[in-house]
């Protein structure tokens, strides 16, 4: 399992072999507020890096979720349909959102923890 | 000047408090070249003169008596209980703002929650929204829901849908690259089949058949329904339609030259997240008291911005309130009685008119409720003749449908008493 | 006080209303129609007698705040007094009783009213024609964009983008998207006004229009509007005016003169038609000559002294709703315009600007004022200065509810954190404004001494803060089949 990497749009990924696990960051869940619903793709659907693959809704906001990698959806976290609050309480663990079967190499230009922290702080003024 | 509250002294005091000498200092950001000397509009009037002028305009319109109105086509004369205006005339309702601060808006929220429940019950579907502008835009909004749900681009209009509903649907569709086709057979490009029950001519359609056809092609079924008819006819929920829409004018609203009226939309629970407009749900406060609140607002324009389901920002809240009062006043018994009385009188009228020389039912094999199309020998002179006797006769539908030349649709409701029917037949025969 | 739902108050066997008998000998629906066409299950509507119904609605009414009783300093909403004369006018049988499909000769008064209202609105905003058809603000906005789209298409010009300021009202991008445009954001400068440099960089032959409101959503007049118009027109794009803030300068200046090609208006804001708890309103759109061919049909024309509906408009974008518009609201707005006249409307805007600046001065030192004055008819404050006490704009709003004020607009515009947007309007007395400032002062004090009570406000209303998150989650439960409670409607619990 590689270290967590981050996108500018506040998703995180970890990679295990050819499978990437994707979620949203603690910063993002705090910004959104209590999550009430996620609109996620079906397994098998192709996703492309940088494209929106779903929507995450809270009471006050709805945000697109952007794929940090290219591949095919292997699984989505079924528990989130009845317990969307897991995204708030455990965004890096039980609140994982999607697993993707990579179609190429894992991207090497995503931010590490330190870079992401800096970027996140800058974006909230 | 009317409705202004500041005295010259107030204005002076306020300018002094702000720390400026004159209004010009407050308007300093406006380029001089834009400043007007005056508005090219007559000066204001006293209330007396204002109302005199307005009344003079009103007096120049001819209002046909309710009981002598036999024209429908989407707007109908009905008995409106006095209770409706007594409730909508309460300033706490009509001058209230949109219920964004729910603690201060429980009256509006609860009343519209009741409306949502009433419409869901009437249509037999799971959830209804807090209302839309009118039946025509409701059809358009439902079609867009279908497009988003199925990913397909075509809306199939089956049978005689109100022509203005079709026009509005086309206007909505063009901007978004959707296609509107008239026909009976959906294809794999069809997002939804839209039909009206009873149709624009007042005739009953095979709602169940059309719904099944839509589903067989992987499309949604959108039923545009007359709300009073739902006291008698099978509602969309019973024949499996996905979305029900319609015009609620008959539920306690005056004709008012076409508006404001109220559109309604209801759907199966699977489609709830696609519903446009406002939705009200139950909630609780920290003390466990039940309240009502605008919910699923993340779908709406002020949050989703360009990704919103629709751009609709308002609902026709006061009109929905009128509809709620009407339905609550009538109850199931009253509504059914209104529908039955209209049915019986319309059938009696149709039978009598059919006996006139040259008159016949345009589609004799089809059933109708209280609006029906008749082939009439000379529509224009007939309608003029009726008007001379203070009767607002039916609608010449060839205005929209060239294949229906000579066809006039007549409407009959519980306000057309038997003596009025006699008069209509008498004058038509003369 | 609370009030049960009509469905909960309902009792079987309650008196049904007495209605006229059919009085004709004809068979009923059950005898004529095939069984499959008939309703199998009766709808479960409430059963209540008239006295119970009137009590029910009166009690619900008393649970509401309304402009008839409370001051509504709602920025961008222009909650001014709703004249009762307007209600009387709209209720006249000569208007209320008209069927939209009556012959034109029988509705000359109605058509003339629409024609006169159109002319009056043209004079106020400086355009050539106005469509009265759109039913609401957002509806009018979308109508305007469709006309602009049709204009470009008629010239064979494929323009796919619409520019929207980052401070814009949410309907702006939504309406643009609904018309099939891509939305591109334009930045505002540090003073909240549109950045000409950013605009320059975003203008291109792909841009169909720039949507703006003036004053902007921060209540500040866009001083460089003439330059903006020139820049936009130079690229062949059009300039659209969002009329939310029109109350700032009636009789003082006109959007048409600034270079706006399409001017949208809200009759339920500037022209005082009542909000009705969320509608109905009306969103007329004024246009300059280039856009006239694309107006929705029918328009109202005066030909040889008679008023006619013109359906023969080949380049029209079509209908945007049924019939001719929210006619009942047009009557109200016309009555208001007639009563106010040019002099009254001008004074109304001047007083609106004066009151806003006065109230802004009173609030100085209590809340943050992120932008330099003067403002126009509204101003934006921020509760950011209360952050050390953990108090947010939402808490200030709820605190105001407890003091018998409807709260100002909060969290808009998005460009100001903890935004509180205040628009007093011209129909509030100086005494009311002073009292409101006093309430704000109290709340700021309360933020220092007892912030917890503000977090829990309101305390004095029929309900306290409602668990909106819980509601949304319960809906998800219902939609996924895990719970029976539909939340979005009442449903009888069957054993």
Image (cartoon, rainbow, N blue to C red):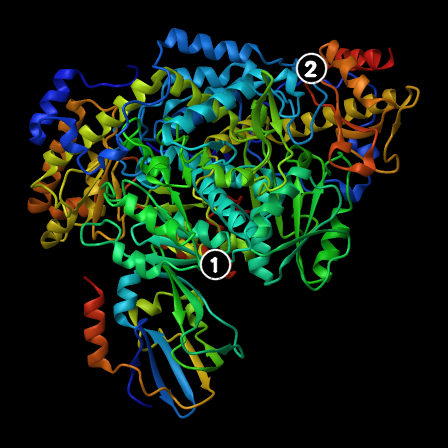
Which numbered mark, 2 or 1, is in the foreground of this view? 1
Q: Residue B403, how many percent across, how many down?
A: 82, 38
- Does residue B274 sit above or below B197 in this rendering? below
- Does residue B302 sit above or below B233 in this rendering? below
Mark 1 belongs to which subunit? Answer: C
Q: Residue at x 64, y 28 (%)?
A: B75
Residue nearer the viewer, B368 or B24: B24
Can you identify the residue that label 2 sits on?
Answer: B67
> How far apart are labels 2 and 1 at the CA level?
53 Å
Can you identify the residue that label 1 sits on?
Answer: C160
- Does residue B300 sit above or below C354 in this rendering? below
**Same chain letter for marks 2 and 1:** no
Which quadrant of the structure image shows residue A22?
bottom left
User: Dots 2 and 1: beta carbons under 8 Å?
Assistant: no
Q: Residue B416, how many percent across, how many down?
A: 71, 17
Regarding mark 1 in the picture, which secondary structure is present there? Answer: loop
Q: Is residue B360 left or right of residue C81?
A: right
Mark 2 belongs to which subunit? Answer: B
Residue nearer the viewer, C54 or B257: B257
Q: Residue C196, how many percent across, how many down?
A: 26, 54
List the single residue furthest toward the bottom. A17
Q: Is residue B250 left or right of residue A59?
A: right
Q: Residue at x 21, y 35 (%)?
A: C402
Rendered-image quadrant of the N terminus of chain C: top left
Mark 1 neighbour class, 10 Å CA radius: few under 14, some 14 to 19, many 20 or more: some
Q: Is residue B380 left or right of residue C255?
A: right
């Amino acid at each position: 399992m590689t270290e967590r990497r981050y996108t500018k749009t506040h998703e995180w990924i970890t990679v295990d072999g050819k499978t990437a696990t994707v979620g949203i960051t603690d910063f993002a869940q705090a910004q959104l507020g209590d999550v009430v619903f996620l609109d996620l793709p079906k397994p098998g659907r192709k996703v492309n890096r940088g494209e929106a693959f779903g929507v995450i809704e809270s009471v006050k906001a709805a945000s697109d979720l952007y794929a940090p990698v290219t591949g095919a959806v292997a699984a989505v976290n079924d528990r989130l349909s009845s317990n969307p609050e897991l995204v708030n309480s455990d965004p890096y663990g039980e609140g994982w959102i999607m697993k993707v079967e990579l179609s190429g190499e894992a991207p090497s230009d995503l931010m590490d923890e330190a870079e992401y922290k800096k970027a996140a702080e800058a974006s909230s003024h | 000047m009317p409705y202004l509250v500041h005295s010259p002294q107030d204005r002076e005091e306020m300018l002094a408090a702000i720390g400026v000498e004159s209004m010009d200092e407050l308007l300093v950001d406006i380029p001089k070249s834009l400043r007007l000397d005056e508005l090219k509009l007559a000066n204001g009037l006293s209330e007396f003169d204002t109302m005199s002028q307005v009344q003079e305009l009103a007096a120049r319109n001819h209002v046909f008596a309710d009981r002598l109105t036999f024209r429908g086509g989407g707007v109908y004369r009905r008995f409106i209980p006095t209770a409706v205006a007594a409730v909508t005339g309460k300033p706490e309702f009509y001058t209230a703002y949109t219920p964004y601060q729910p603690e201060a808006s429980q009256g509006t929220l609860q009343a519209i929650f009741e409306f949502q429940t009433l419409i869901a019950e009437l249509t037999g579907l799971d959830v209804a929204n807090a209302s839309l502008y009118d039946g025509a835009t409701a059809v358009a909004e439902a079609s867009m829901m279908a497009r988003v749900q199925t990913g397909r681009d075509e809306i199939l209009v089956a049978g005689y849908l109100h022509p203005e509903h079709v026009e509005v649907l086309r206007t909505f569709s063009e901007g978004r690259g959707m296609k509107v086709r008239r026909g009976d057979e959906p294809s794999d490009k069809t997002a939804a089949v839209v039909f009206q029950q009873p149709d624009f001519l007042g005739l009953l359609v095979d709602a169940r058949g059309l719904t099944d056809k839509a589903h067989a092609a992987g499309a949604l079924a959108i039923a545009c329904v007359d709300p009073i008819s739902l006291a008698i006819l099978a509602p969309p929920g019973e024949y499996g339609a996905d979305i029900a829409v319609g015009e609620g004018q008959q539920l306690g609203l005056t004709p008012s030259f076409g508006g404001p009226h109220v559109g309604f939309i209801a759907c199966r629970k699977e489609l709830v997240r696609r519903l446009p407009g406002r939705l009200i749900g139950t909630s609780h406060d920290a003390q466990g008291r039940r309240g009502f609140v605008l919910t699923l607002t993340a779908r709406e324009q002020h949050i989703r911005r360009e990704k919103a389901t629709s751009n609709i920002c308002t609902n026709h809240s006061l009109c929905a309130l009128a509809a709620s009062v009407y339905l609550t006043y009538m109850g199931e018994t009253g509504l059914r009685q209104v529908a039955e009385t209209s049915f019986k009188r319309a059938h009696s009228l149709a039978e009598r008119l059919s006996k006139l020389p040259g008159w016949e039912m345009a589609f004799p094999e089809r059933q109708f409720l209280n609006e029906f199309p008749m082939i009439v020998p000379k529509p224009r002179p007939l309608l003029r003749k009726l008007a001379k006797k203070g009767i607002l006769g039916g609608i010449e539908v060839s205005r929209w449908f060239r294949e229906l030349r000579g066809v006039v649709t007549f409407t009959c409701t519980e306000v057309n008493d038997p003596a009025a029917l006699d008069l209509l037949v008498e004058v038509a025969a003369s | 006080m609370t009030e049960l739902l009509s469905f909960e108050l309902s009792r079987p066997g309650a008196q049904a209303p007495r209605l006229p008998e059919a009085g004709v000998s004809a068979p009923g629906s059950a005898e004529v129609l095939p069984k499959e066409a008939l309703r199998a299950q009766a709808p479960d509507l409430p059963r209540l007698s008239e006295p119970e119904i009137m009590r029910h609605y009166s009690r619900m009414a008393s649970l509401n705040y309304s402009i008839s009783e409370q001051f509504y300093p709602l920025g961008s909403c222009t909650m001014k007094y709703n004249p009762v004369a307007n209600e009387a006018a709209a209720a006249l049988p000569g208007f209320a009783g008209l069927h939209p499909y009556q012959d034109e000769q029988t509705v000359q008064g109605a058509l003339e009213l629409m024609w006169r209202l159109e002319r009056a609105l043209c004079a106020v905003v400086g355009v050539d024609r106005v469509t009265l058809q759109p039913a609401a603000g957002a509806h009018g906005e979308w109508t305007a964009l469709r006309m602009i789209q049709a204009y470009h298409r008629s010239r064979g010009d494929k323009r796919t983008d619409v520019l929207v300021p980052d401070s814009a009202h949410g309907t702006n991008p939504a309406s643009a998207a609904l018309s099939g445009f891509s939305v591109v954001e334009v930045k505002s400068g540090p003073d909240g006004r549109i950045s000409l440099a950013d605009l320059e960089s975003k203008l291109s032959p792909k841009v169909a229009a720039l949507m703006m409101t003036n004053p902007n959503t921060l209540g500040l007049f866009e001083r460089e509007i003439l330059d903006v118009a020139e820049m936009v027109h130079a690229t062949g794009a059009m300039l659209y005016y969002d009329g939310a803030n029109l109350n700032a300068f009636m009789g003082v200046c006109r959007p048409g003169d600034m270079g706006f090609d399409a001017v949208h208006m809200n009759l339920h804001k500037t022209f005082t038609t009542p909000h009705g708890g969320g509608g109905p309103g009306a969103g007329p759109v004024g246009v300059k000559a280039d856009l006239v061919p694309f107006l929705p049909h029918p328009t109202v024309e005066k030909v040889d002294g008679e008023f006619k509906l013109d359906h023969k408009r080949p380049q029209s974008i079509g209908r945007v709703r049924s019939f001719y518009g929210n006619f009942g609201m047009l009557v109200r707005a016309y009555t208001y315009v007639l009563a106010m006249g040019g002099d009254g409307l001008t004074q109304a805007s001047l007083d609106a600007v004066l009151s806003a600046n006065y109230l802004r001065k009173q609030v100085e030192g209590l809340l943050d004022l992120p932008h330099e004055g003067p403002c126009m008819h509204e101003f934006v404050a921020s509760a950011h200065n209360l952050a050390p006490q953990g108090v947010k704009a939402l808490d200030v709003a709820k605190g105001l509810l407890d003091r018998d004020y409807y709260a100002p607009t909060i969290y808009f515009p998005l460009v100001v954190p903890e935004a509180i947007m205040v628009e007093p309007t011209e129909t509030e007395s100086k005494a009311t404004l002073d009292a409101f400032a006093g309430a704000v002062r109290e709340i700021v004090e309360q933020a220092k001494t007892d912030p917890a009570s503000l977090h829990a406000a309101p305390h004095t209303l029929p309900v306290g803060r409602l668990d909106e998150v819980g509601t949304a989650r319960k809906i998800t439960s219902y939609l996924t089949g895990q719970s029976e409670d539909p939340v979005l409607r009442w449903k009888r619990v069957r054993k």
